[in-house]
Amino acid sequence: QVHLVESGGGLVQPGGSLRLSCAISGNIGRIYAMAWYRQTPGKERELVAVITSGGSTFYADSVKDRFTISRDNATLQMNSLKPEDTSFYYCNLNGAGPHGGPVDYWGQGTQVTVSS
């Protein structure tokens, strides 16, 4: 059984920073990519950032130059936070299981609130 547990969310003032981490437990065959998504009530879940096993990264335009994702626990460093970054953030793992079949895991999410 694989579990992803996010941490690091909370309340921060506009312009502040937070760092999200995603702890992985369980038997993972191979990780292809780790990603962060976010979702606010009434809206679709949106991709925030992705990092592949090779270190390639992708960022949504709305967070480019402010957020940085790294492979260590899929850490998401969020700087210059804006009220519109307020959302529930989810960690995602895409890879192959111990027997080679595709796997896609999600954490329970962590709330990020940017407000003065």
Image (cartoon, grey):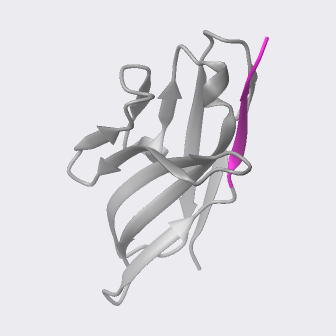
Q: Measuring 54% from the left and 72% from the top, which residue is drawn there? A: 26
Residue 89 figure quarter: top right
Q: Which residues are magenta?
A: 109-116
Q: Residue at x 30, y 86 (%)?
A: 100
Q: Report the magenta stretch's main SS.
A: strand
Quadrant assignment for the N terminus: bottom right
Q: Residue furthest front?
A: 42
Pick the front one: 87 or 23: 87
- Percent coordinates x, y for residue 81 in the rendering: 58, 18
Residue drawn 58% across the image and 36% down it: 20
User: Is residue 97 something one can see in this rendering?
Assistant: no
Whether residue 65 can be seen here = yes
Q: Is residue 115 magenta?
A: yes
Q: Is residue 107 left or right of residue 56?
A: right
Q: Is residue 115 above or below residue 50?
A: above
Considering depth in this image, is 58 or 101 the residue closer to the camera? Answer: 58
- Count of picture labels: 0
Locate residue 12, reporting x and y percent: 73, 18
Residue 5 point in image, percent of width and height: 64, 55
Give the side of residue 70 with respect to residue 21, left or right.
left
19 and 1: which one is in front? 19
Q: Quadrant of residue 55?
A: top left
Quarter of the image that includes the C terminus? top right
Asked if residue 110 lies in the magenta stretch, the reply is: yes
For residue 69, above or below residue 100: above
